[in-house]
Image: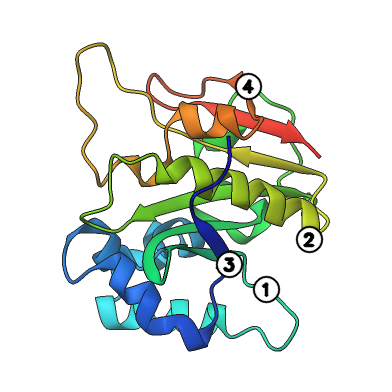
Amino acid sequence: MEMRTRVVPATPEAWDDVQTVFGLRGGTHHCQCQRIRLGDGAWWHLSVEERAHHLREQLDVGPGLTSGALLGYLGEEPVGWVAVAPRTEFVRYRGSQVPWAGRAEDKDDAGVWAVTCFAVRAGFRRQGLMYDLAAAAVEHAREQGARAVEGYPIVPAPGQEIAWGEVNVGTPGPFAAAGLTEVSRPTRRRRVMRREL
């Protein structure tokens, strides 16, 4: 499938575009893509402004380097965001069942990257943009030398709707389309999907 979305590394110069995607209210705006990265303990006590400050610092990695955050555009319109980085950078996952339950994985293996967070701008949702973002995240991880890439999507129970605030971790379809396959089910609603690169 050909990508409709142009996906590029997020930089400090694109800060206004990042915030356009995140919006002025809702879970994505309030999180600023920090909860999984910082962990609940640190994240919970920060204001939105402090979380945004952390994010802006994370984007400012210097010339020729990448933070792992990617922005998607339709034409010139910023429409999506995806975070992908070495799994070791995400504090919240170190103490969680996701991604470790039932697996003998080295928590310090920086060669395994994780796709942790998606955002699609209000007005552009339900158009399949998460598929383009997932494919771009896998390719970005490969280009940066990742040995494998994982995602931790949510799966609704039959007949259950997923709230948009929950779907920020992704759903299985976009990961499967990007070549990831299920390797475990750490909880009733979460999956671990992985692709060796």
> Whole-percent x and y of residue 11?
55, 80
**Which residue does the numbered mark 2 point to in the structure image?**
144
Residue 189's place in the image compared with 17, above or below, is above
> Whole-percent x and y of residue 91?
54, 57
Q: Nearer the viewer, mark 4 or mark 3?
A: 3
Tag 1: Cα neighbours inside 10 Å, few (<14), some, or many (≥20)?
some
> Which sits earlier in the primary sequence, circle 4 or circle 1?
1
Q: CA distance from mark 1 to mark 2?
A: 9 Å
Tag 4: Cα neighbours inside 10 Å, few (<14), some, or many (≥20)?
few
| Rendered-image quadrant of the C terminus | top right
Q: CA distance from mark 4 to mark 1?
A: 32 Å
> Which sits earlier in the primary sequence, circle 1 or circle 2?
1
Residue 66, label in figure: 1
Residue 75's place in the image compared with 173, above or below, is below
Q: Amino acid at mark 1?
A: Thr
- The quarter holding residue 99 reads top right
Q: Nearer the viewer, mark 3 or mark 1?
A: 3
> Which sits earlier in the primary sequence, circle 4 or circle 2?
4
Q: CA distance from mark 4 to mark 2?
A: 28 Å
**Which residue does the numbered mark 3 point to in the structure image?**
8
In this view, which residue lies farthest toward the left? 25
**Which residue does the numbered mark 4 point to in the structure image?**
102
- Observer-nearest of 101 and 159: 159
Residue 114 seen in this snapshot: no
Name the residue at 58% across, 85% down. Answer: 60
Tell me whether the residue at label 1 lies in contact with that at label 2, contact meaning CB atoms closer than 8 angstroms: yes
Q: Nearer the viewer, mark 3 or mark 2?
A: 3
> Which sits earlier in the primary sequence, circle 3 or circle 2?
3
Tag 2: Cα neighbours inside 10 Å, few (<14), some, or many (≥20)?
some
| Rendered-image quadrant of the N terminus | top right
> Whole-percent x and y of residue 13?
50, 88
